[in-house]
Structures are given as structure tokens and as C-alpha cells.
Amino acid sequence: MKFADFICSGSVTAEVESESKEAVITEIVKNLADAGGISKDACDDIVAAIMKREELGSTGIGRGIAVPHTKHDSVTKPVGTVAVSKEGVDFDSLDGEKVELLFLLVSPPDQPKDHLRALENISRQLEEDTFRRFLKQSKTAKDIQQLLEEADNNQFVS
């Protein structure tokens, strides 16, 4: 699965405004809804589901990365977004570092394989130092979208 299969391009955020974990999740879920990726009516439920998932263990996986995700019956296919925080957000990450790169994913409960494929793509691409560095340096949503397209074309895989 490629980023183009699930990232809602109009929702990509080059600079989040929020500074706390729940606030940044709320902000990027709202951006996803504003871009038509998810229903605006489902925003609060999706944020609550993601926060419940966070209680099981932080999705802040280290190296300045978080991958908040959930399954929700308001979507018919996996949908996600990308956001960058220049200041970093305290996400209770495994390494204790602030999160600068956020990849949020919402999938239908009846498509666990697609959910895992999307998460696998995200984690595989984020293994690449160059990809992470370029994402953190992105100035615009268009820059981020271009990097996602380049990643889809295997330009960062070593």
C-alpha cells in the first residue's frame, strides 16, 4: 500500500498549532474532516478512539515520530494524514523525545489487513533518515505531499 492509497492530500499540515498530545490529535483529525477525508460528525468519536488507543501505550514510537491510529466504522477505507510540528509535541514517546512528525490513520474495523498494510508502509518509509529529515524541513503542505509521492516511487528506500 502506498501513501497515495490512504493519505488525504488536502489534510496535510506543514505546521501544527497545537502543543499537547490531545490538542494536536484533535487538530489533525479536524484537518482530515475539513479536507473531506472523514465525516465532520465523526471527529469527536475518532479523537476519543485515538486517545483510548493511546492509553494502551503511546504511538510515539521514537525519533520524533508518532503514528496515532484507530479503527472506526465511519470510514469505508483507510484514510490518513500527515502533520509536522516544528516545536515538537510531548507524546509520552518511547524514547522520551518530543514528536515532530505525525502520521494519523483511521481504518474501517472490517479491514484489518489494509490497516496493517498502511501502518507497515508508514513505518517502512520512516526508517529512512533522509525521508524523516526532509519531512521535518518541509515548509508547506505541498512540500510534504511531494515527499510522499517520492516515497511512493521508492526514492528513499536504500
Image: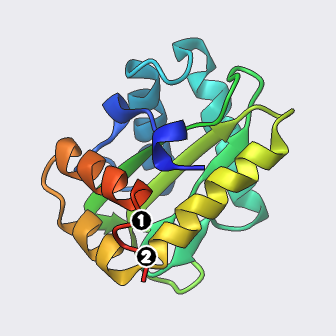
Label 2 belongs to which residue? 157
The answer to which quarter of the image holds residue 114 is top right
Count up the numbered dots. 2
Q: Could one spot residue 52 in this view of the protein?
A: no
| Above or below 109: residue 157 | below
Image quadrant assignment for residue 117: bottom right
Foreground pick, 151 / 72: 151
Quarter of the picture containing the C terminus is bottom left
- Calculate the distance from the C-alpha at mark 2 to the C-alpha at mark 1: 5 Å
Type of the residue with mark 1: Asn
Rendering coords of residue 155 (x, y %): 34, 68
* Kind of residue indicated by mark 2: Val
Q: 28 or 11: nearer the eye?
A: 11
Residue that carries the numbered disc 1 in the rendered image: 154
- In the rendered structure, the answer to whether residue 52 lies left or right of residue 26 reads right
Percent coordinates x, y for residue 119 in the rendering: 64, 57
Task: Give the secondary structure at mark 2.
Answer: loop
**Crowd band around label 1 with a 10 angstrom C-alpha radius: few (<14), some (14–19), many (20+):** few
Q: Position of residue 141 (x, y in %)?
A: 22, 43
The residue sitting at 44% across, 81% down in the picture is 63
Dot 2 surroundings within 10 Å: few (below 14), some, or many (20 or more)?
some
SS of the residue under disc 1: loop
* Image colouring: rainbow
